[in-house]
């Protein structure tokens, strides 16, 4: 159980940090949410992982920690959940508003977005060119094999 | 009634915020909201003053919420440091409220409610005696600050706001991680109890407790804008509306307060972990100070210049606190009050200048006419002298009080060099900004073509609406500085006594443990 808990916290944290460092506000928000889940589990487990014991006093059960689970981390985690939930709502509204105002959801604003678009276009153009060249080579080889002239650019893409 | 006094700084703004939400300005107009806000602020000032007088006698007051003993319930603590911070927050808050009442509160919906929540969060963070409630009040003041910063804003401000919110949520997550680990290892979150258990931590757990403490300090340093984590500050403060940026000048001080409290109390009660973080904070504070001075020289807007000055004052305070002696902490606390007021005044001034220069805004690389420059010019002179630390104003006294108390040792030379060198660079930066904004109101003979093309003549500057309240708020803030000079002796006596009290945390722990519930027997 400890192993499962610990790896859950670890994996959630790793995924959260990865997403937090990405360039789109949606990813960042998702990362923050995952991080808050990891934190909630961590606080919860700081009262030690125990099975089948109540957090509140009951008649007939001795009032000590051997027969109960620590109630304080559960209260703390409740507070933490509420706050994280509210903050997620706030930041989502903020991200939507920022996207509407600045016409993009890049976390560094329109200049970074323009740079990103430029690079993407360059990358796409290069990929298209490479694919085109590969097609021409393949077409020439096919033509050499069957004796027909190679297909023109537009037809091969269609 | 007097026994319940420590609760009022939290309760009064909470009720006022609720009332401000009820008296919605679209239905009732601005007047009821303003009356609510000002009555709350007046009560806060009175309560803070009473608490400071009480704490000034050296007594540490413990208020048990719900009459539960401190180890089970929540305790509020008032010692000299808390009372001082309460007074600073209330004084700064009134000036910011005055500035906002000139018109910003009409443009930003629910300004008064957010403002009161912010005061509640600040006061709560200064008063609380356990770390988890420190987190809760941090959240209260942060959520209010998101509202204050973003309400009524659009465009670039929203992007800066997104950074600010995301950064702070990440920092709060780290705070929670630290709290979870702390509770898992030590089994309590009350600061006084933590101090006792940290002092007696067994050798095999020491590294883990130290790592947890370090994590906690990282969070506070992120709020206080220490070296690797200060990048959020200039952008946020530059884009915040003037009254809000001025109020935010106490937000970095909340981080500093938390560092000081945790450093002197939780990790200050002896034992091998005592004061483990101070050497690292000293070095980082020094580098931050140097970078802040460079930022002041490089800033292109008056507002970002003010933001870097704010960063510089936080870094100076890190130096003062990290030296861990009663004298430097005492001098540092005087400097803390001074830098909150003078830094806030600089933000308000930047707004005054910005509105008089039309399209040129507060950019100092553009030449623009500045109609009616006499009042802002004179105020800028006072603020700049005060912030650069020249005699006879409060900045000089604050820096002097820190420097003369630096304990002799290998650090002495470097601390003096950094504080004086950065003061000089800030002086140059402030003088350059002043000459550019106030004296160069038309293109000078050797100006380049581009500068001539961008010149904004007086005819193109729309007449700034005359808002005497805004000028009055700036004058009030600078007046606090003057009052601090006139009352320097009693103030320094108080802050030095605070330093002594902080470095003897045994009394604090004793007081928490000795305070028993009145009517409850748990």
Image (cartoon, coloured by chain):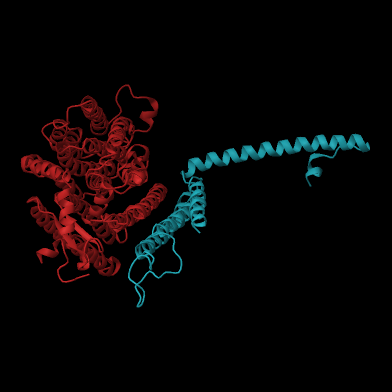
- In front of the other: B437 or A16: A16
x and y percent of residue B43 in the render?
14, 61
Say if residue B500 shows up in the picture.
yes
- In front of the other: B2 or B307: B2
Q: How many marks?
A: 0
Query: In which quadrant of the rendered image does the N terminus of chain B lie?
Result: bottom left
Query: In which quadrant of the rendered image does the C terminus of chain B lie?
Result: bottom left
Say if residue B239 shows up in the picture.
no
Rendered cyan, the chain in question is: A
Residue B307 vertical position relative to residue B65 in the rendered view, above or below? above
Residue at screen point 36% across, 29% down? B451
Residue B151 vertical position relative to residue B336 in the rendered view, above or below? below
x and y percent of residue B440 in the render?
26, 30
x and y percent of residue B468 in the render?
18, 50
Residue B5 placement, left or right of B21: left
- In front of the other: A52 or A31: A52
Residue B507 vertical position relative to residue B485 in the rendered view, above or below? below
Rendered red, the chain in question is: B
């Amino acid at each position: 159980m400890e192993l499962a808990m610990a790896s859950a916290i670890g994996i959630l944290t790793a995924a959260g940090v990865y997403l937090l460092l990405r360039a789109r506000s949606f990813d960042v928000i998702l990362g923050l949410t995952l991080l808050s889940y990891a934190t909630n589990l961590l606080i919860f487990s700081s009262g030690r992982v125990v099975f089948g014991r109540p957090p509140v006093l009951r008649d007939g059960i001795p009032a000590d920690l051997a027969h109960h689970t620590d109630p304080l981390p559960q209260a703390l985690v409740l507070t933490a959940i509420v706050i994280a939930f509210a903050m997620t709502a706030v930041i989502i509204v903020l991200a939507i508003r920022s996207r509407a105002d600045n016409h993009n959801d890049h976390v560094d604003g329109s200049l970074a977005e323009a740079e990103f678009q430029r690079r993407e276009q360059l990358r796409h153009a290069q990929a298209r060119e490479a694919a085109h060249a590969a097609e021409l080579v393949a077409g020439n080889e096919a033509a050499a094999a069957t004796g027909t002239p190679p297909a023109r650019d537009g037809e091969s893409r269609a | 009634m007097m026994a319940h006094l420590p609760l009022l700084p939290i309760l009064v703004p909470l009720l006022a915020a609720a009332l401000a939400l009820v008296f919605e300005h679209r239905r009732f107009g601005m007047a009821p909201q303003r009356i609510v806000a000002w009555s709350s602020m007046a009560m806060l000032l009175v309560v803070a003053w009473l608490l400071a007088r009480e704490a000034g006698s050296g007594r540490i007051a413990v208020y048990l919420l719900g009459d539960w003993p401190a180890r089970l319930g929540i305790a509020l603590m008032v010692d000299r440091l808390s009372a001082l911070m309460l007074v600073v927050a209330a004084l700064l808050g009134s000036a910011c409220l005055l500035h906002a009442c000139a018109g910003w509160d009409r443009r930003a919906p629910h300004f008064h409610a957010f403002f009161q929540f912010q005061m509640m969060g600040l006061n709560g963070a200064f008063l609380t005696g356990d770390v988890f409630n420190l987190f809760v009040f941090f959240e209260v003041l942060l959520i209010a600050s998101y509202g204050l910063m973003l309400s009524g804003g659009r465009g670039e401000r929203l992007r800066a706001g997104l950074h600010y919110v995301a950064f702070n949520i990440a920092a709060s997550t780290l705070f929670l991680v630290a709290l979870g680990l702390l509770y898992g290892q030590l089994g309590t979150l009350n600061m006084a109890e933590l101090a006792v258990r940290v002092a007696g931590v067994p050798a095999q757990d020491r590294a883990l407790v130290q790592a947890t403490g370090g994590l906690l300090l990282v969070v506070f340093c992120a709020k206080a804008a220490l070296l690797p984590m200060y990048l959020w500050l200039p952008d946020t403060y530059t884009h915040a509306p003037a009254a809000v940026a001025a109020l935010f000048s106490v937000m970095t001080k909340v981080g500093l307060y938390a560092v000081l409290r945790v450093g002197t109390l939780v990790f200050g009660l002896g034992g091998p972990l005592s004061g483990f973080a101070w050497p690292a904070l000293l070095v980082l504070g020094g580098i931050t100070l140097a970078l802040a001075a460079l930022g002041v020289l490089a800033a292109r807007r008056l507002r970002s210049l003010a933001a870097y000055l704010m960063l510089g004052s936080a870094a100076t305070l890190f130096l003062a606190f990290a030296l861990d002696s009663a004298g430097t902490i005492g001098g540092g606390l005087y400097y803390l009050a001074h830098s909150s007021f003078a830094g806030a005044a600089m933000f308000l001034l930047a707004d005054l200048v910005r509105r008089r220069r039309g399209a040129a805004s507060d950019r100092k690389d553009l030449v623009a006419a500045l109609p009616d420059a006499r009042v802002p010019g004179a105020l800028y002179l006072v603020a700049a002298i005060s912030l650069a630390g020249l005699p006879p104003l409060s900045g000089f006294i604050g820096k002097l009080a820190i420097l003369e108390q630096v304990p002799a040792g290998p650090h002495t030379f470097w601390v003096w060099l950094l504080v004086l060198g950065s003061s000089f660079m800030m002086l140059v930066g402030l003088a350059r900004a002043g000459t550019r904004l106030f004296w160069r109101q038309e293109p000078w003979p050797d100006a380049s073509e581009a500068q001539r093309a961008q010149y904004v003549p007086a005819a193109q500057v729309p007449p700034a609406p005359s808002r005497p309240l805004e000028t009055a708020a700036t004058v009030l803030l600078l007046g606090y500085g003057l009052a601090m000079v006139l009352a320097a002796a009693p103030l320094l006596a108080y802050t030095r006594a605070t330093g002594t009290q902080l470095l003897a945390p045994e009394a604090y722990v004793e007081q928490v443990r000795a305070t028993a519930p009145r009517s409850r027997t748990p």
